[in-house]
Image: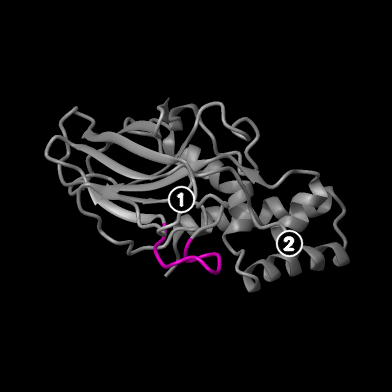
């Protein structure tokens, strides 16, 4: 059965790319080089990384237009479903000798009406002190720095972890080839990934950043937005960061 939305989008994309090929006089050798790069990105496990670097943030911005709750953010290619459910006091799964500055992340989850959403689930993941992710990079225990936790009756949450660093995205594969040819760097600013869900509300994918950090102003993925900044307080013992989420009721 014909899907009208698919027809609208794909046929317009086809016309746009044909015009692009003519405009830039793309020859067959260049066309094959481009298609081979896309195929190689899939073979080398970069099937999401390559388009995400260039296009995911823009698609997310479209979804945020006229949105009344917290801004959504890019998910990135490193999410893994099924992280352990943590119990209070919540501490992200980590190695006994996990390196990094201690971090405490607190905040609230409410609806757009301001009412607290107790029992909301926050699925959180981030890089270790070397900029590496469990389940993605070798030599890291399963679920390291990945966990899910629930808000309390007042919608509040608190979880302890380590401060994630800026890091380079993979640069030795197809994505790196393209970025090198463009003369761009490979760094992402320090960030925390989250998915926030609550019964009766639209799920939210978020990615939160640290104001003033390296690469905040020139993220390789161009994904940093003002509404995604954490409030940060440095103490003698740790870094304390805060963010409050606002979810939108589902429409049926």
* Residue 227 spot, x, y in % from top left: 44, 28
Task: Determine whether 235 is above or below 6 in the image.
Answer: above
Category of crowding for the residue at label 1, using alpha-carbon neighbours closer than 10 angstroms: few (below 14), some (14–19), many (at least 20): many
Residue nearest the observer in this picture, 13 or 172: 172
Element under label 1?
Answer: loop
Q: Is residue 121 visible?
A: no
Q: Is residue 127 left or right of residue 117?
A: right
139 in magenta:
yes
Which disc, if any, is residue 126?
1
Which disc, if any, is residue 172?
2
Residue drawn at point x = 55 percent, y = 69 percent: 138
153 in magenta:
no
**Could you tell me what secondary structure mostly forms the magenta stretch?**
loop
Q: In this view, does 114 lie to the left or right of 232?
A: left
**What colour scheme was applied to this rendering of the protein?**
one colour
Q: Give the range drawn in magenta.
A: 134-144
* Residue 242 spot, x, y in % from top left: 35, 31
Dot 1 or dot 2: first in sequence order is 1
Task: Determine whether 140 is above or below 247 in the image.
Answer: below
* Residue 192 spot, x, y in % from top left: 44, 44
């Amino acid at each position: 059965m014909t899907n009208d939305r698919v027809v609208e989008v794909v046929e317009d994309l086809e016309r746009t790319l044909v015009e692009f090929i003519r405009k830039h006089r793309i020859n067959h050798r260049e066309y094959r080089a481009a298609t081979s790069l896309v195929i190689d990105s899939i073979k080398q496990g970069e099937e999401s990384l390559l388009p995400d670097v260039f296009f995911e943030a823009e698609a997310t911005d479209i979804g945020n237009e006229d949105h009344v709750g917290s801004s959504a953010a890019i998910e990135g290619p490193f999410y893994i479903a099924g992280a352990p459910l943590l119990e209070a006091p919540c501490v992200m799964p980590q190695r006994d000798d996990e390196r990094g500055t201690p971090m405490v992340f607190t905040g609230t989850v409410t609806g757009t009406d301001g009412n607290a959403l107790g029992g909301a689930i926050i699925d959180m993941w981030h890089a270790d002190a070397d900029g590496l992710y469990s389940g993605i990079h070798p030599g890291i225990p399963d679920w390291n720095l990945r966990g899910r936790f629930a808000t309390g009756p007042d919608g509040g949450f608190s979880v302890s972890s380590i401060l994630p660093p800026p890091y380079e995205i993979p640069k030795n594969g197809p994505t790196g080839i393209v970025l090198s040819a463009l003369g761009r760097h490979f760094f992402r600013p320090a960030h925390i990934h989250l998915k926030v869900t609550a019964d009766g509300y639209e799920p939210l994918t978020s990615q939160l950043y640290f104001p003033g950090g390296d690469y905040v102003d020139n993220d390789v993925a161009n994904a940093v937005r003002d509404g995604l900044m954490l409030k940060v307080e440095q103490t003698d013992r740790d870094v304390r960061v805060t963010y409050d989420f606002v979810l939108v009721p589902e429409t049926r």
